[in-house]
Image: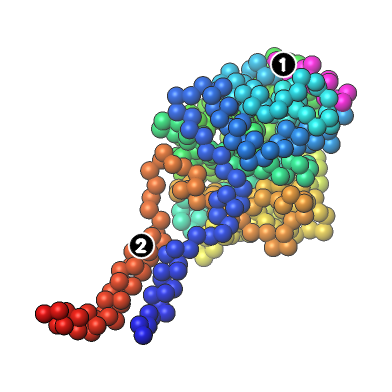
Amino acid sequence: MLKIPPIIICLILFSFNISANDAENTVPIFRIDAKNKSGTEIGIVLGKAIKEKFPQVAQKYDSYLAENLDQKTFEEWAQKISFLISNIDPIYQDEVNAIVSSWVMSSRDHLGDGHLSAHEFWIFQLMPEIQQGIHGSGFGVFGKASASGSPIVGRNLDWKTTEALRSLQAITVYEYDDKAVVNIGFAGYAGVMSGFNHQGLFGAFLDSPTGIRYSNSPKSQHIIAFELRKALETSSNIPNVEERLNQQQYHSSHNILLADQKRVAVLEQSQGFDTQLRTDVSPLKTETLWKKPHQIAVVNCFALKSLPSNCIKSIDFFQWHRFKTLAQFNSLNNKAHVQDIMNVMLDTFNMNPYQKVFNQNTVQSMVFTPQDQKLYLYTQPVSGIHETNPVMHEIRQQSLFSMIPQKWPFQNLFLIVGILLLIGVLIYGNYPILIKKYKKNQ
């Protein structure tokens, strides 16, 4: 009986192993062929795909809105959002309208009735900014603090969600002729809370409230989530994004965590101020002193010395100083690997459940490496109860991009070696039998 050496069996099993936690087993991935398509065409295709995956999507969004807004507040917002929508790229407007029209849409604006109207869906699109609820934090290393020498960036999205909304977590990939944008968020949400493009440019926005409330001022019409998507579609590096996003005034104040193939930085955008880029050597306020070479942290307030002081919450202070404690990577004997950044973003030090870096409101935690566009993602369970030992699972590049040439995974080398060795062993093990058959036939 032919015996195959255990080492060969291991090689073959490893070569064929595909993690059960990869790609769509973590979250659904909607990959949209956007080449030469209008916003309406993109929205129709995406809307139908979402409806097929989530048959109750309209009811789920209606349920989420009903649990977070009262009817009076909704009606007040609905009367004021037209000027905000009008300043969004028309292609994105058409996409959103087409998505909701492909579902069972209601003409009645009434929260909690089990139906979704166009106004209700637009309120959801703008809610992260007009409600100022996109909280969280981020941390990244690059240069001498990184084991690979290239950037590694982590981002936690903290948002008040419901069971309905958590069940709609998804990744949407827009593929164009020569570019692609990955939107990590929720099915049908057309702006970008966290995302990256095929060139490894990563961007994520976090609220940094200054106390200025909702306003009809023409100077604050732009919605950062949609501007960030446009920046990812048209930019290849941090300077490109800085230039583009500095052209507009925004409805709210916020931070933008950025990473490209060279470094990690934060765009701090306060109403009434020009966009300012914070690096690891920027002058900071006394309460946010850093002095951590090639390391960057961001929370829901401004750290730059030249911007308003809005670190008024204990959560902001604690998370900032917790990152400062964790940022011990250096050029000597403690360079950061991907797992190290995962550990930072999943840190739960502190008795207060909301002051932790990884806390009860963390709905998504991720780490991204721009050089090879690898994404590692944890999503909060639908129940809202975090796993005892949360793990970020790799979303492989092959699962995200189809039109971008892929580097062959290293494990395929094991596949070839394993197959060749198996063939060799089979031939060698059956060689005497083959010889006998050959002589018999002569």
Q: Along the horizontal axis of the image, is 421 left or right of 359?
A: left
Residue drawn where x is 68% and y is 59% of the image? 390
Residue 82 got which mark? Answer: 1
Residue linked to disc 2: 413
Q: How is the image coloured?
A: rainbow
The part of the image, by quadrant, that contains residue 326 is bottom right
Residue drawn where x is 37% and y is 83% of the image? 3
Secondary structure of residue under mark 1: helix
Amino acid under label 2? Leu
Q: Name the quadrant of the C terminus.
A: bottom left
Q: Nearer the viewer, mark 1 or mark 2?
A: 2
Secondary structure of residue under mark 2: helix
Residue drawn where x is 41% and y is 39% of the image? 403
The residue nearer to you, when weighing 307 against 375, is 375
The residue nearer to you, when weighing 80 against 266, is 80
Q: Is residue 437 magenta?
A: no
